[in-house]
Image (spheres, grey):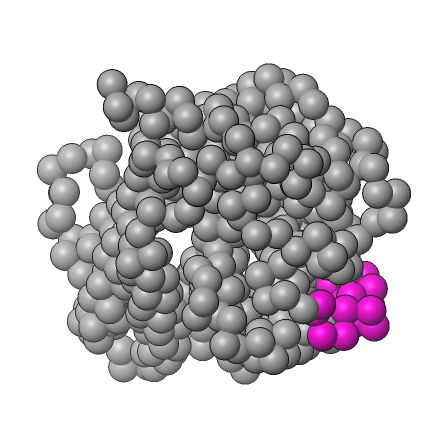
Amino acid sequence: MNVIGNLWSSLFPDLSGDLKNRESERAIDASIRFPLLSLIKSSIVWLILSIVFGLIASIKLHTPSFFAEYSLFTYGKVEPIFWNTLVYGWLFNAGFACAIFLLSRLGGATAGMGLFLTISIVVWNTAVMAGVVGIMAGEQLPYEWLEFPAFVGPVLFTAFVGIGFWCLLTFRNRVHRSSFASQWWIIAALFSFAWIYTAAQVALVCMPAQGAMQTLINSWYAENVFGLFVAPLTFATLLYLLPKTLGAPIVGHKYNTFIAFWTWILFSSFAGASELVFGPVPVWVSSVGVIAMFGLLLPATALSVQFLSSLIRRFSAIWDAATPRFLLGGSIAFVFLMYFKVFGALRDSASVTQFSLYDSGVNCLALFGFAGMVFSGATYFMLPRLLNKELPSPTLVDLHFWSQLMGVILVSIGLISGGEQMGALMNGSTADAIAVVAAMRSSYFMTTIGLVFLLMGAVFSATTYFWLMVSNRTDAEQSADLIKEAPELEYTAS
């Protein structure tokens, strides 16, 4: 009964402190508590499931007999399940949570309609589950990050429209009429995904394009899921959380943000074609993609300087709280990510890495390292404010950080360096398939160990979440001003 009581007090906190202090924030938190907790819980569950499937796929690369007797766990099924649950399960749920929280806080009001938003979230996660079941039943589509069966697409899109509509209404109902950089990135991400997902579904599923156009559209879509949705939400989260957690405005935010925003949106829209160097498309198409990938260096440099300069200037604050540590890890991962993306777009490099594990390593660095680190830090920022409880165990949070960091390093090194080695061997005239597989075993083992670390981090995160939900509320936590806010910094995230 005590556990049930603690859970009830988490969902419906009785804050008997200063009724005027943080009154507006408490009202906002109350209106979005259920949807946000649902999103955070779903993201953690999907992360664990995704890594489990990724582990099975990784083990099969160096031990093919693993689960060989079970047709549900063939490599052709578990590998797409890994990527789709990682993207649509973990990152989309975490990204939605950040978008809802940021729009509500920066606007000073919400759209209400909490039940509508919660239903949309349930439909989204139900569609993702249906997609997983469809893939295991052998109904997957042959397109990267679009392997869910055809019937799942309309349901996912409907749920996304519901969540996006709520976010747009919240932005429209904002009390503070000025807009801020985090809001720009979120609104751009919502419109961008609606556009690219509709275009991909129509051109690949409803009215399939012919021949090489399918490859071009699929590459364009997969790159833009990150470039026009996941990355913008990550930028928005960084731009909001850095001043809130460091206690100072972001370095150069008045000068670089506008340019970085528009150049990123422009170049990212075309960067997907860079994956088709030497592919079955006109040379000028892939050349446009290569140029766009190099163009991303402009906004990436501007944003990296902003993020890292702000963190280094207040470096002592990084170890005083959980969130800044994750933000630092994500910012550093972003620098390496853009280097490897640009390197992989070079024609000389693509001749080696194009049909190897290199792109998978870059994607893991993007999803686990950059976006994953930032969204994890945001979760530890949002939960105490939603529940008005302190994190129950700093040690668990530390273990999560170091486990995720080690996992990102090992998986990225294993796949990226292994991809370069694989490409060089495949290009060698004397190398055969058996020799390539034998030479890659160490990279496969490193990737597997890295995924084990990532799974440990996900379990630590889940433990923290559920412990926080059912823990006793202390006398201090009854106070409305337990969480020390910085109202003067609330609107310096532009």
Which image quadrant for residue 170? top right
Q: Residue at x 71, y 58 (%)?
A: 489
Q: Residue at x 73, y 26 (%)?
A: 111
Q: Residue at x 25, y 18 (%)?
A: 1
Whether 119 is drawn above or below 311: the answer is above
Toward the viewer: 4 or 342? 4
Instruction: Pinpoint residue 401: horizontal percent, then vertical percent.
Output: 36, 62
Does the magenta segment cover residue 259?
A: yes
From the viewer's perspective, tell me whether residue 178 is left or right of residue 370: right
Majority secondary structure of magenta residues: helix
Instruction: Pinpoint residue 298: horizontal percent, then vertical percent.
Output: 73, 75
Whether 331 is drawn above or below 214: the answer is below
Residue 400 seen in the current view: no
Which image quadrant for residue 62? bottom left
Instruction: Pinpoint residue 6: horizontal percent, then vertical percent.
Output: 34, 27
Toward the viewer: 29 or 62? 29
From the viewer's perspective, tell me whether residue 232 is left or right of residue 170: left
Q: Which residues are magenta?
A: 249-265
- Quarter of the figure that contains the C terminus: bottom right
Does the magenta segment cover residue 283?
A: no
Residue 257 seen in the current view: yes
Q: How many marks?
A: 0
Instruction: Pinpoint residue 89: horizontal percent, then vertical percent.
Output: 45, 38
Toward the viewer: 357 or 480? 480
